[in-house]
Amino acid sequence: MPPPQQPPHLRFRRRPPPHHQPPPPSRRRRRPPPLHQPPPPSRCRRRRRQKEKMAHKVIHSHADLEDLQGICSPRAQQGIRSDERVYVRVVSLESVRIAHESYALLRQLVDLKSCLTPHLDLLSLVACLSLELHKVEHDLLPPLQDQEARLEGRVVQVLLSMRNSATTLLRLAESVQGIEELCGLFEEELDDGAVSGRVKEVGIVLMDTADLVLKGTYNLVLLKERVPHLVKLISDLMATPVRIS
């Protein structure tokens, strides 16, 4: 017997949903999506903001650094926050002669975290030049001017030290020349040329003088006649003002 057929109006009736269909969505109110959070500030941006909050100090002389030390040293002993540091911009110093003292003072303030400056490396170069010239002027040349000096013992040691100082000055001349070309370190226009050329000249004269005496070409009489010229070269170089552009 054939199966009974459904009426036409029931043949295409939709099937009931399966029992495993997921439950209808709940009527709980959805939370709004979180707002876009800006990324954390970068290190450079934080430093820029920190620099803007700092007090600024422009240095024109060694006396300005001494005044800054009188302000910052008592605060450093009490403890100073990073946003209370002083941003130091070194514009000039009186001369190369005092540069090593200025560098030592500024280095002390930086080590105490009292101030921040981008010019410490430049002053370090000038301080090395100042110390080397000071050594030649006060330690090496005076024994050669002694009337009773002989080419033995201490005089030979002085001449060997002059060669070492000459080598150091020639290396410093190359560094000074690179800084002069990049950002300027001394006065832009000098009557007798760039400072790096004058440093190189002093190094060459010192080297030639020491070699000529040690090889026997010069005697002590000719050496003593050449010392005043060396003293003048070094004194003029030590009196050069320092300008940082």
Image (cartoon, grey):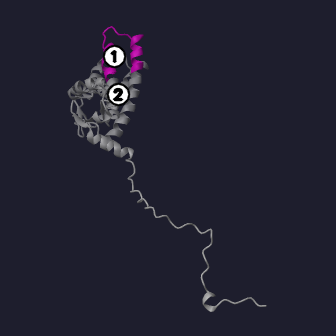
Please tell me whether residue 71 belongs to the stretch shown in magenta: no
**Span shown in magenta:** 133-161
At label 2, counting other C-alpha atoms closer than 10 Å, the crowd grade (few under 14, some 14-19, many 20 or more) is few
Q: Nearer the viewer, residue 81 or 150?
A: 81
> Where, quadrant-wise, is the C terminus in this rendering?
top left
The residue that mark 1 highlights is 139
Task: Sort mark 1 into few (<14), some (14-19) or many (20+) by Cα contacts within 10 Å.
Answer: few
| Magenta highlight on residue 138 | yes
Q: Is residue 149 above or below residue 136?
A: above
Q: Quadrant of residue 113?
A: top left
Element on which disc 2 rests: helix
Is residue 232 among the parts visible in the rendering?
no
**Sequence-first tag of 2 and 1:** 2
**Position of residue 183 measured from the top left corner of the image (x, y, whole percent):** 30, 42
Describe the element under mark 1 as helix, strand or loop. helix
Can you tell which quarter of the image residue 138 is in?
top left
Residue highlighted by disc 2: 111
Q: Position of residue 40 (x, y in %)?
A: 39, 48
User: Which residue is pictured at 21% across the width and 33% down the height?
Assistant: 60
Q: Is residue 221 left or right of residue 10?
A: left
Query: Which residue is depicted at the point 32% across and 17% down?
Result: 141
What is the chief secondary structure element of the magenta stretch?
helix
Considering the image in quadrants, where does the N terminus appear? Answer: bottom right
How far is the residue under mark 2 from the one under mark 1? Answer: 30 Å
Residue 127 seen from this side: yes
> Residue 50 location in percent, x, y?
31, 40
